[in-house]
C-alpha cells in the first residue's frame, strides 16, 4: 500500500521508521487544504478584531509621544498570528499524512522535522465521524493516552482530542477504525 498523495520519502519513512515489526497499513490519506483552513475561520474572525484593535491602540499611543506605544507591538504580532491561522493550517495540511494500521492511527507532520503522533487502539475511547458529503469528512478521536515516536512509551495527558481532518475516503477510514477498535 502507498501513502495517498505522499512522496516516496514519506512512505519510506513510514515503512522504515514508524511501523513496528509485523504492523500492516490498511488505509492512508491526507487532509484537504480547504477543510484544514476552514477550521481556522473562527480564529480569523477573532484575530481580525484583535489585530485591528491592537493597530488602533499602537497608533493612538504613538501620537501621545514617547516609547510606550512599543508595548503594543507584541499584541499586533499576536493578532497577526491569530489572523493568519487559516493560512497556517492550510500550510500544515500540505505537510500532513495519515495512516491507519492494524494496531494504531498515525499522523505524520513534516514541518521542522517529522513529528509522529500515534493513537493506539486500546487508548481510543471514542471517535466521531463528521460526514460533509461526497465521501469526504473528518474523524474526531478521543483518547486518554498519547503516544509519540516509536514504541509504547506513553504520557498521560487526560482526554486528548485529535483526528483525521478533511479526508477523502471517509467510509473506508471509519471502517478501518471500527475494525481496529474491534480487534482490541
Image: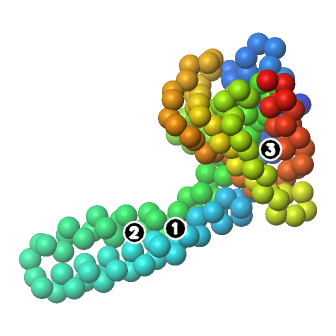
Residue 102, x across and y down, in percent: 82, 25
- In space, the residues marked 2 and 1 are separated at their CA atoms by 10 Å
Q: Which dot marks residue 79?
A: 2
Q: Is residue 76 left or right of residue 30?
A: left
Q: Nearer the viewer, residue 149 or 88?
A: 149
Give the residue displayed 18% in from the left and 81% down from the top: 61
Query: Crowding at label 2, few (<14), some or many (≥20) Cα neighbours within 10 Å?
Result: many
Badge 2 marks a residue whose secondary structure is helix
Residue 93, x across and y down, in percent: 66, 52
Query: Crowding at label 3, few (<14), some or many (≥20) Cα neighbours within 10 Å?
Result: many
Residue under circle 1? 43
Badge 1 marks a residue whose secondary structure is helix
Residue under circle 3? 29
Q: Is residue 31 left or right of residue 71?
A: right
Q: Earlier in the sequence, mark 2 or mark 3?
A: 3
> Residue 66's quadrant in the figure?
bottom left
Q: Are marks 1 and 3 in contact (CB under 8 Å)?
A: no
Amino acid at each position: 500500500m502507498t501513502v495517498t498523495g505522499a512522496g516516496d520519502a514519506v512512505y519510506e519513512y513510514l515503512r522504515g521508521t514508524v511501523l513496528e515489526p509485523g504492523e500492516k497499513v490498511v488505509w492512508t490519506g491526507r487532509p484537504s487544504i480547504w477543510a484544514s483552513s476552514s477550521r481556522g475561520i473562527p480564529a480569523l474572525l477573532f484575530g481580525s478584531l484583535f489585530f485591528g484593535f491592537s493597530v488602533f491602540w499602537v497608533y493612538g499611543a504613538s501620537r501621545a509621544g514617547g516609547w510606550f506605544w512599543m508595548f503594543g507591538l507584541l499584541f499586533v504580532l499576536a493578532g497577526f498570528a491569530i489572523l493568519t491561522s487559516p493560512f497556517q493550517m492550510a500550510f500544515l495540511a500540505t505537510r500532513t499524512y495519515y495512516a491507519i494500521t492494524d494496531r494504531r492511527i498515525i499522523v505524520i507532520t513534516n514541518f521542522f522535522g517529522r513529528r509522529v503522533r500515534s493513537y493506539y487502539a486500546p487508548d481510543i475511547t471514542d471517535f466521531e465521524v463528521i460526514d460533509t458529503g461526497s465521501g469526504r469528512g473528518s474523524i474526531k478521536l478521543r483518547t486518554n493516552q498519547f503516544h509519540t515516536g516509536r514504541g509504547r512509551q506513553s504520557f498521560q495527558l487526560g482526554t486528548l482530542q485529535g483526528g483525521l481532518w478533511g479526508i477523502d475516503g471517509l467510509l473506508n477510514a471509519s471502517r478501518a477504525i471500527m475494525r481496529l477498535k474491534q480487534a482490541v
